[in-house]
Image: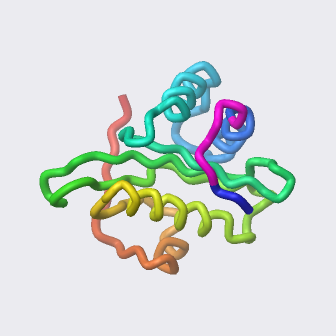
Amino acid sequence: MVVRAARAADADAVFALVQQLGAAFVPVRGAFDASFTAAVDSPDDADLFLLVAEDSEGVVRGYALTTVARLLSTNGLSAQLQEIAVDAAARGQDLGTELVHAVEAECIRRGVRQITVASRRAGGFYDRLGYSQNAEYMRRVF
């Protein structure tokens, strides 16, 4: 398994993974393409980064999208793991763990002070990785 920065050629594979998320929004390819292009074309120190996990055959099996912001309360940069998905057929092979560790390594490289993740369905997964529950996130959709 290799975790690396996403490339333009990964768009179809990542879109297929987005469709597996079961989120509140139905993925629209045009909107996805605009967001994906912005993430892939962002500079190395941008406020977001997109990583993909590919198997030994070069097939993208997972992705993680993370945003980075300077907060007043964290004495510097803070990151939010916004989205993480592993292909249903590849679950149970530690791809999610490898993606989270790669996100953490990139955050450390950038000087991020904390990382947060909103997760109602995968709390046990993050508990095992050393995360602690600290807040309940609220959402309003426009």
Q: In this view, does 17 lie to the left or right of 51?
A: right
Residue 16 horizontal/vertical position (percent): 72, 39
24 w.r.t. 106: above or below: above
Give the quadrant of residue 13.
Answer: top right
Residue plotted at (61% across, 31% down) = 27
Q: Is residue 5 magenta?
A: yes
60 w.r.t. 42: above or below: below
Give the quadrant of residue 25.
Answer: top right
Q: In this view, does 48 lie to the left or right of 72?
A: right
Residue plotted at (49% across, 76% down) = 129
Residue 91 horizontal/vertical position (percent): 73, 64
Magenta stretch in the rendered image: 4-10
Q: Nearer the viewer, residue 65 or 30?
A: 65
Q: Describe the colour scheme in one phrase.
A: rainbow
Residue plotted at (38% across, 42% down) = 45
Which residue, as the protein is rendered here, is positioned at the far top? Answer: 30
Residue 141 horizontal/vertical position (percent): 37, 34
Q: In this view, does 42 lie to the left or right of 21?
A: left
Residue plotted at (26% across, 53% down) = 77
Where's the N terminus, which quadrant?
A: bottom right
